[in-house]
Image (cartoon, rainbow, N blue to C red):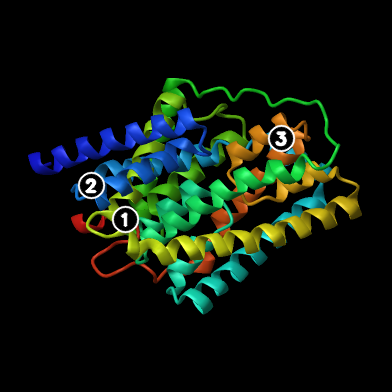
């Protein structure tokens, strides 16, 4: 790696870490993603030249995939048997939100199809940002729209839920971390399979490899626990910073449309999700606060924590959000198609340095 690129990377990581720290102190949702994205974006707009090397970014994709797959445990399979119709409605809702929001992005804001679908995704922030880094799209719009969604939902959902005097007293168990030998083994196998997926030109090959290997080991109870915080937090910071590097050399005026479109789409999907949650609550006799949080297209970690704080049913909420993320992981590649990588890019995000 040339020294100039190493210097840019070090500066990018430093700015991203600072943004994550500030966002966490303020209490931002998903601070390790949004904080670095905002900080690096502002630094880029201010004139700094920042970048993330492709080898670092691709390594992050594998780790994120493993983290995603670790949520698919035998407990989730048991939960599916308890609320089958509610789970079906989650998948219907996610599909409707995605396609309606993408249509709005294309029809009224004139974004290309790939950008519209990525910006419209009702959740799975890290996965969507990873896909955006891998495809021919306006990553600035995707990053801004997704950030607006997470921020707005985190602010609005508690205000809506507290209007209802409902709730349970359950708590969410602390997620344990995988032991180091198991983590290293999954990383190694994921890397090998990811190389195969690269040759087959699958979309988000490294991310997909990590996800599949992690799911196969966790659903069979061969592995337990998630990616330890000492690894996943830096990975989130680097991923958020990578999105922020897209703002190098542009002005605030250029991102105005992305801000407006992100706000409009978030309001639309929030209203649709709330309507579906109300229907499920009425038909299946699910507490309304739990249904609203479970169907909200917000971040998994944020919504799970919110369920505890607002005394909603954390098992119901957590299971639905995990299913939403799993379903989005399957739905997004089909919605995007496999011909959306840009000239000079492979389906894995290995591309020229300007697009890092």
Q: In the rendered view, tell whether residue 310 sits above or below residue 54.
A: above
Can the viewer see residue 201?
no
Marks 2 and 1 close (CB-CB < 8 Å): no
Residue 216 lies in quadrant: top right
Residue 352 lies in quadrant: bottom left
Q: Position of residue 354 (x, y in %)?
A: 20, 57
N-term-proximal mark, 3 vs 2: 2
Q: Residue furthest left?
A: 3
Q: CA distance from mark 2 to mark 1?
A: 14 Å
Structural crowding at the residue carrying mark 1, measured as other residues with C-alpha within 10 Å and reported as few (<14), some (14–19) or many (≥20): many
Mark 3 vs mark 1: give the one in front. 3
For image coordinates 72% across by 40% down, the residue present is: 317
- Mark 2 element type: loop
The N terminus is located in which quarter? top left
Marks 3 and 2 close (CB-CB < 8 Å): no
Can the viewer see residue 267?
yes
N-term-proximal mark, 3 vs 1: 3
Q: CA distance from mark 3 to mark 2?
A: 37 Å
Structural crowding at the residue carrying mark 3, measured as other residues with C-alpha within 10 Å and reported as few (<14), some (14–19) or many (≥20): many
Q: Residue furthest front?
A: 253
Residue 163 lies in quadrant: top right
For image coordinates 57% across by 29% down, the residue present is: 222
Structural crowding at the residue carrying mark 2, measured as other residues with C-alpha within 10 Å and reported as few (<14), some (14–19) or many (≥20): many
Q: Position of residue 110 (x, y in %)?
A: 45, 77
Q: Which mark is residue 51?
A: 2
Q: In the rendered view, tell whether residue 163 sits above or below residue 262.
A: above
Mark 2 vs mark 1: give the one in front. 2
Is 26 positioned to the left or the right of 47 in the image? right
Q: Which mark is residue 349?
A: 1
- The residue carrying mark 3 is 307
N-term-proximal mark, 2 vs 1: 2
């Amino acid at each position: 790696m040339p020294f100039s690129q190493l210097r840019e990377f070090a500066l990018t990581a430093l700015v991203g870490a600072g943004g994550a720290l500030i966002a966490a102190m303020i209490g931002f949702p998903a601070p390790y993603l949004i904080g670095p994205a905002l900080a690096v974006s502002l630094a880029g707009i201010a004139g700094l030249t920042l970048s993330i090397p492709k080898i670092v970014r691709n390594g992050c994709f594998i780790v994120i995939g493993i983290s995603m797959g670790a949520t698919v445990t035998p407990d989730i399979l048991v939960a599916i048997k308890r609320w089958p119709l509610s789970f079906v409605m989650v998948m219907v809702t996610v599909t409707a939100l995605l396609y309606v929001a993408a249509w709005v992005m294309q029809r009224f804001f004139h974004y290309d199809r790939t950008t519209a679908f990525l910006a419209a995704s009702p959740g799975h922030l890290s996965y969507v940002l990873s896909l955006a880094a891998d495809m021919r799209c306006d990553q600035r719009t995707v990053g801004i729209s997704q950030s607006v969604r997470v921020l707005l939902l985190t602010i609005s959902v508690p205000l809506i839920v507290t209007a209802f005097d409902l709730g349970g007293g359950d708590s969410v168990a602390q997620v344990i971390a995988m032991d180091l030998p198991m983590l290293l083994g999954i990383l190694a196998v994921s890397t090998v399979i990811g190389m195969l997926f690269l040759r087959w030109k699958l979309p988000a090959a490294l991310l997909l490899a990590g996800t599949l290997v992690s799911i196969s080991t966790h659903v069979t109870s061969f592995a337990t626990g998630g990616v330890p915080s000492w690894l996943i937090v830096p990975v989130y910071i680097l991923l958020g910073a990578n999105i922020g590097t897209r703002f190098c050399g542009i002005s605030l005026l250029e991102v105005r449309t992305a801000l407006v479109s992100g706000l409009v789409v978030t309001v639309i999907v929030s209203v649709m999700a709330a309507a579906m949650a109300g229907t499920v609550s009425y038909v299946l006799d699910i507490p309304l606060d739990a249904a609203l949080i479970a169907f909200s297209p917000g971040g998994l970690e944020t919504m799970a924590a919110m369920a505890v704080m607002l005394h909603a049913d954390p098992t119901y909420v957590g299971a639905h959000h995990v299913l939403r993320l799993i379903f989005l992981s399957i739905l997004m590649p089909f919605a995007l198609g496999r011909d959306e990588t840009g000239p000079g890019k492979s389906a894995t995000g290995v591309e020229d340095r300007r697009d890092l």
